[in-house]
Amino acid sequence: MNNRPISLLPDVLISQIAAGEVVDRPASVVKELLENALDAGATEITVRIDGGGIQRICIQDNGKGIPKDELELAVTRHATSKIQSLNELESVMSLGFRGEALASIASVSQFTLSSYPKGQECAYSISNQSGRWLVEPSPASPGTTVDVQSLYFSTPARRKFLKTEQTEFFQCLDVVKRMALANPSVTWLVYRDGKLQSRFQESSWSARVFSILETMANGASKPIDVQTADMQLHGAVGLPDAARGKGDMQFFYVNGRFVKDKLIGHAVRSAYEDVLHGDKFPAFVLFLNLPANEVDVNVHPAKTEVRFRNARAVHQWVRQSIQACLAPSRAVVSLSEPSLGVDGPAVAAPSGGTVWRSSSTPMPAVQVQAKSAALPFLREELADYIQAYRPIESAPRPTAITPRPLVQDTQPNHAVENAEHSEYLGQAIAQVHGIYILALRPDGMVVVDMHAAHERVLYEQFKNALDNQQTISSQELLVPLLVQIDPRLASEVDNGQHLWEKLGFRLSLISTQEIAVRAVPTMLAGQDLSALLQQWLEDLHQYGVAHVLERQRNEWLAGLACHTAVRANRKLTVPEMNALLRSMERTERSDQCNHGRPTWRHFSLSEMDKWFLRGQ
Ligand code: ADP
Ligand code: MG
């Protein structure tokens, strides 16, 4: 304990303390400086990073610049041109507003800012020279350049928390990517230790997304654009194919600001729950816009967390919107859009790859809400991405398939060519190694993993039955099936009556050790169900009916689906195989099995031509 009287802290110390929060590492310096450049309306931004940003961060923009007589204010704590009142804070649209970034950065580095606003006679710079600000003329091009050297030289304790130069550099690069995804009309250049590392040329939004998130290209993502009276969600969600082993392809923005928010993270994760393998991370770039007074961005000094006034509504809406976007399988989509006939031309994605034209929910024509902080430019640019996915009703349909004498001659089944458009997955012709179904489409062939596909179809049917008060069609057994059970499970037969009925079973207890199965779901007819029934009774016994129905439900149904789906090596007849293909076409999410693995693949004739170098 000391006996010092209370006194005000010196200014520099206050800024150094603030720096611990605002600019705790090179990447946060980059973030603050880039936000300033964007707030100044820059269209070209060059980022130079030496020694992981610890040696030097230099950011040059062509924005509106800072007049000479405001330079000293710009680097003064709590001086900003962006807000002036609490009212303005509550509806703030600029990325910055706290007026402390430059002061904080300058307090922990060797700092020079040069600026050349339009109309001024020349550029001026301001730098900290032994504790004082020095303003002098400087050679600089229009806009602003901020040069930050020897970061944390005055606060060595902070320096100790930094990682390797390599790690710090990639953190900085991540920050640039976040900003670049939200600002496709800006050109970004990143130099690392003097060498050009990345360049994102001004482009359409989709081209920007595909250049930064390559896994989303080639049809592996879907555009989303939905809105309510005051919320709007747009961007692109990666299909399960685009998922990754780590969460580095996840970009969520609230009113144009990149956030890492728990609530949002949870909403997105749960939207993917049903289509993605548990240890995979989905890829997405999503922009949520809502009225500024519905969200508090001033929760955290770095502004990466937000607080929603109506958190629950936001959570639910975001989750449902993404879920709805992901649900229709590519095969299902083709059903509702007959013009997507199998002989229609595939559309080239902006990246040059091929995408299936699928538009999940009809894309509503969205007007930008005046009161929401939307980014209209971005939405315009999203339009061409959506366009690429739209069914192209007006597109000229080729009258015939490109002549391919050899292939056509050898096609075993002429009906295939005239196949109904709705038969998107084609006509089954064979079972391959007891695992796959091979189907023909006029434009190539489809290979289906029969177990995975059947599993998903069953799962969705079970879920629908429970959700929509439907009953699964059931078949009476001429001779009841007798199943031995453990006497301690006997009471569960009656407890679960409601469930059995829903799922298409009729069971009754014959003795404490035996049940009679009198009816089974039609789709399970002919299968050995005794092991499954015993497992169910065990589950009911352990968790209780209510719990199984509410909490464990999906897991339980998935287990049921997996158990009852056709096993490898079971011989399927051609009509059976076709029946499976047709039910896949009617089933949501049938592109993936319950574990998130794909259920089918299409091989186009042109792809096969490439295998054999035909026509090259
Ligand atoms: P804030 O961004 O919260 O206002 P900063 O400390 O980051 O606070 O910046 C202070 C002020 O300096 C800004 O309000 C802005 O007027 C000006 N400024 C900073 N960087 C730039 C830039 N790159 N171009 C133009 N003006 C800038
Ligand atoms: Mg700022």
Image: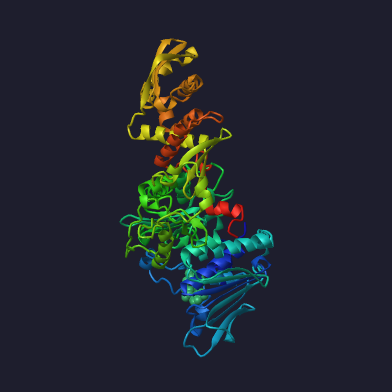
Q: Residue furthest top?
A: 511
Seen at 57% across and 67% down, the residue is 30
User: Does residue 476 lie above or below 169 as drawn?
Assistant: above
Which quarter of the figure has residue 546?
A: top left
Asked if residue 145 shows in the view, the reply is yes
Q: Nearer the viewer, residue 501 or 444?
A: 444
Which quarter of the figure has residue 191?
A: bottom right
Residue 351: give x, y in percent of width and height: 52, 62
Residue 544: give x, y in percent of width and height: 43, 24
Quadrant for the N terminus in the image: bottom right
Q: Nearer the viewer, residue 259 or 444?
A: 444
Q: Nearer the viewer, residue 417 or 66?
A: 417
Quadrant for the C terminus in the image: bottom right
Seen at 51% across and 61% down, the residue is 209
Side (left or right) of 226 relative to 278: left
Residue 348: give x, y in percent of width and height: 48, 60
